[in-house]
Every structure is written in C-alpha cells, then in structure tokens.
C-alpha cells in the first residue's frame, strides 16, 4: 500500500510539474520585403493571421517619425496600415497562443492611446489601454495568455502606431506520459482497494 501511495504521489507531482517549455517566437518583421513602400503582413507570418497590419522599412523613413524611432531591430516595423480602418488584429485559427510582449510607438503624435484586447474564444479576457510616444518605443509586457485573437484599437483613422519585436509563444500541453502515469496509478489504487474489500469479506 505504501509503495502504491508513493507511485500515486509521484504521478501527481509529475502531472503538476511543467512538462514542456513555451516555444517562443520573436517577430521582428525583418524577413519581409516591403521595398520602398509598404506591404500587408501576409497571413501565416509567425503562424498567425494578420488583419490591418502592414510592414514598412523604418530605416528609410523620416528620423522624427515613429517608423524610424520605433525600430528595435533593423529595418522593418509593423503598423496599422489601413487608412480606412486603423484598427488591426492578430489571431490564430488553429491553436491558442500567448501574446507575451512587444514594443509600441506612436507614428507621429505623442500621447497616442492604443487599446489592446485579448479574446479567448468570443470572451473578452484582457483589455488594457497604453499610451505611446513618438520619440522612442515603449516595451509592453502584455502577458495575454492562451488567447485566440488580439485586437489593437485606436480612436480615429489618423491614429497610427508602430510595433516591433513582438514575442509570442505556444500554449504548452501536459506531457502524455504524465497523464498515463496518473491513470495507471489511480487504476492500481482502485484494484488494490477491491482486493482488500474481497479479503475483508
């Protein structure tokens, strides 16, 4: 009985302990090729779906603009490019993801506010507003965990923000070996109890 109890404790401990590490991906946008203009960020970049986001070469923009000052890794930065709807989003159609952090910069006007919402399914789970300046990027530790979609909302079509070095990570799943160990230990405990009940008859 003591041995079985020890195995059960070990199995539960194994199940509770982290079995896999987050597979982190740093999105620098530098592998995309916007040329002298800009291009929409293609779906599939970083394993995500992109809506309303474009990429531009910040190194060739005016040095006083957030496109230039918002560069964390040269040369490209993302921005909300749709002039008719400056709201933008990233999402995953397959598995949830963690939106860990990113650098945000106002493209032109200091004091720009960006509301960033995180959804799990259709439920609004995270909702924070951040104030940007245009002279340097602001590092934001979002920690939006297990989301399916992240929306970036601005006040008007004149509000443009820049994003660089966004860090995302996969949501880890429990190790199947730990689940099997727990199941085996629980089955063993049930069998031992039945044996003891028969012996007590």
Image: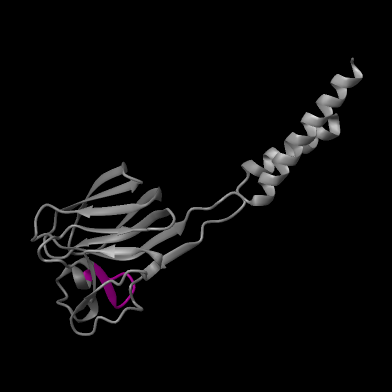
In the image, what residue occupies the spot 87% across and 26% down?
A: 195
SS assignment for the magenta stretch, majority: loop
- Along the line of sight, the residue nearer the viewer: 85 or 72: 85
State the image quarter where residue 6 is shown.
top right
In the image, what residue occupies the spot 37% across and 49% down?
A: 144
Residue 30 image point, x, y percent: 34, 77
- Residue 21 is left or right of residue 186, and the answer is left
Residue 10 image point, x, y percent: 74, 40
In the image, what residue occupies the spot 22% across and 76% down?
A: 39
- Along the line of sight, the residue nearer the viewer: 128 or 111: 128
| Region rendered in magenta | 69-78
Q: What colour scheme governs how the chains and residues are painted in the rendered image of this protein?
A: one colour
Q: Is residue 50 above or below residue 198?
A: below
Give yes or no for residue 116 being in the magenta stretch. no
- Residue 166 is left or right of residue 155, and the answer is right
State the image quarter where residue 33 is shown.
bottom left
Which quadrant: the C terminus?
top right
Residue 72 shows in the view: yes
Residue 130 image point, x, y percent: 23, 50
């Amino acid at each position: 009985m003591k041995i079985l109890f020890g195995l059960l404790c070990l199995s539960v401990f194994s199940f509770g302990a982290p079995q896999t590490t987050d597979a982190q991906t740093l999105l620098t946008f530098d592998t995309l090729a916007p040329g002298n203009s800009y291009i929409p960020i293609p779906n599939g970049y970083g394993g995500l779906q992109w809506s309303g986001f474009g990429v531009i070469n910040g190194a060739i923009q005016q040095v006083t603009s957030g496109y230039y000052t918002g560069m964390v890794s040269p040369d490209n930065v993302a921005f909300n490019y749709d002039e008719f709807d400056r709201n933008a989003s990233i999402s995953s159609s397959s598995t949830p993801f963690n939106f860990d952090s990113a650098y945000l910069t106002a493209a032109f006007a200091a004091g720009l506010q960006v509301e960033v919402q995180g959804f799990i399914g259709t439920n609004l789970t995270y909702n924070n507003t951040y104030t940007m300046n245009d002279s340097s990027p602001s590092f934001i530790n979002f920690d939006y965990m297990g989301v399916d979609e992240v929306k970036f909302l601005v006040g008007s079509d004149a509000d443009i923000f820049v994003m660089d070095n966004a860090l995302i990570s996969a949501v880890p799943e429990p190790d199947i070996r730990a689940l099997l160990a727990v199941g085996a230990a629980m089955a063993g405990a049930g069998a031992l109890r039945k044996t003891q009940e028969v012996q007590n008859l």
